[in-house]
Amino acid sequence: MMDDKSKEPQPLNYLSPRDDVQMHKERRGQRVRGAVFACSVVLSTVVIFGLSTIRIGMPGPPSRHDQIMAMFWPIGGLSLLIAVAAYQHFRRRRRWFVQGVLIGIGIAALIEGACFGLLR
């Protein structure tokens, strides 16, 4: 016969999620990529919007086409951010990327706010 000790299952020694260095490294990377992506999209959208609304040497109000094109860039940038964030969240299950996108939007808003506030 066998010992009673050998029949008892051995407890598993799992790593606590708090101590999982690889998981934290991956999440941090997703946040950084999301923040860099969102910040670059927002800043480039603002720059392109600003350049598309400058009218040098053209008297009179902007045409209807100019107004539509000026609104295309902010709407396009916002649509791009939403589409990529939704894809990362729902298809690839990367909610940390979405957190990075929100952080990037906040950083870009602070940069733009400081620029407009200082140049006013």
Image: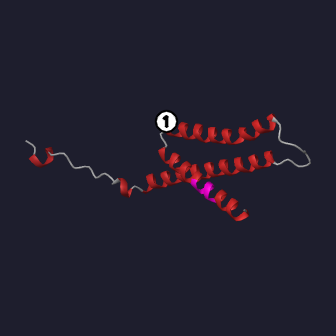
Instruction: Residue under label 1, please give it.
Output: 90
Residue 21 covered by magenta stretch: no
**Closer to us: 43 or 23:** 43
**Residue at (71%, 49%) from the top-left corner?**
46
Q: Position of residue 114 (x, y in %)?
A: 65, 62
**Residue at (10%, 43%) from the top-left corner?**
2
Q: Is residue 27 visible?
A: yes
Q: Position of residue 83 (x, y in %)?
A: 59, 37
**In the rendered view of the protein, which quadrant contains the N terminus?**
top left
Residue at far bottom of view: 118
**Closer to us: 41 or 11:** 41
Q: Main secondary structure of the magenta part?
A: helix
**Closer to us: 37 or 119:** 119
**Residue at (67%, 62%) from the top-left corner?**
117
**Rendered image quadrant of residue 79:** top right
Circle 1: residue type: Phe
> Magenta residues, as a range?
106-110
**Rendered image quadrant of residue 59:** top right
Q: Position of residue 57 (x, y in %)?
A: 92, 48
